[in-house]
Amino acid sequence: MAETVLLKTDPRGVATITLNRPEKHNAFDDSLIGELTARLIQVNNDKQVRVVVLTGAGKSFSAGADVNWMRAAAQYDEARNIEDALQLAELMSTLDNLRKPTIARVNGATFGGGVGLVACCDIAIASTAAKFSLSEVRLGLVPSVISPYVIAAIGARNARRYFLSADVMDAQQAREIGLVHEAVTAEQLDAAVEKEIGLLLKGGPRALTAAKELIAAQVILSTSARRNLHNKTANIIAQLRVSKEGQEGLNAFLEKRSPNWIKK
């Protein structure tokens, strides 16, 4: 069975982590969440690693949560759903707080939780082939666990629009609202990422870590408040997954029909 997350480190200390479920558009399930978290902890503790690049295999960066996994989760009780949601929260927190500089190499479609991964990276470079959407409300859910990171990236005003409308953005729109820093053609993507890597490698490793800590220290939320927010967001998504609306949204998506809140 193929690994769902690949890790390769080059002689410069650049670690590339690749989401490796191309047939599922690199969608999350519990296995991928656990493996990605483990890989991030591994590179964080590796003194040879200086820069981390996160990308996706195939045509997509990440389609967010695997719908079949969510469908199974809808049959769990609320306590099990909270546990699953907290694992995702732990993944986002691990990426957001990584001591090494991180670059999102956004090679294609990025939906739901995939947007959260992009928002958690220090630098995000997107191909103009990429599309972005916070599509959860279409399934009767919300982008709960990723919300602190996405709102930090795009601001509350843009969150009001895109959380509620689930509108699809192109890479240029994502750049305009602050989700990504640069949008380049697919042919230019590797060169643009390599340019950022080169800039980061010129910085002192301890200084880069200190710079990240300095920025984090300016965040209004304290560590305890952020932990409480993790619990709150996990509870929100767990409750929606087992709700009638959440189950109707997921079933409608899988059955390729409109959910019952869309009146014909």
Image (cartoon, rainbow, N blue to C red):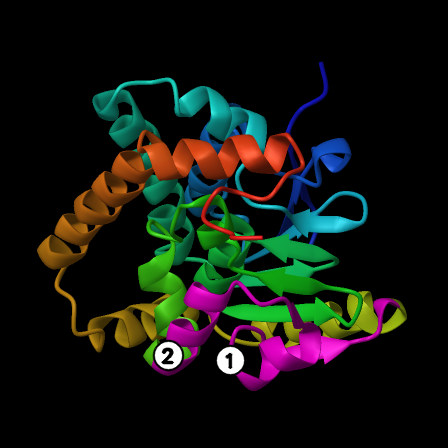
Contact, CB < 8 Å: mark 2 with mark 1? yes
Q: Is residue 96 left or right of residue 71?
A: left
- Label 2 CA crowd tier, 10 Å (few <14, some 14–19, many 20+): some
Q: Is residue 233 above or below residue 127?
A: above
Q: Which residue occupies 50% across, 54% down?
A: 117
Q: Is residue 15 above or below residue 73?
A: below
Judged from the image, the secondary structure of the residue bearing numbered disc 2 is helix
Structural distance between the alpha carbons of marks 2 and 1: 8 Å
Q: Which residue is at the front of the view, 262 or 83?
A: 262
Q: Which residues are magenta?
A: 157-186
> Which residue is label 1 attached to?
178
Q: Is residue 170 left or right of residue 218?
A: right
Residue 192 coordinates in the image, percent (x, y)? 75, 74
Which residue ends up furthest to the front in the rendered image?
Answer: 264
Q: Is residue 67 above or below residue 209?
A: above
> Which residue is label 2 attached to?
155
Disc on the earlier residue, 2 or 1: 2
Residue 141 coordinates in the image, percent (x, y)? 40, 46
Residue 196 falls in image quadrant: bottom right
Q: Which residue occupies 52% across, 73% down?
A: 179
Q: Amino acid at mark 1?
A: Gly
Q: Is residue 239 visible?
A: yes
Residue 242 coordinates in the image, percent (x, y)? 32, 29
Q: Which residue occupies 75% across, 43% down?
A: 57
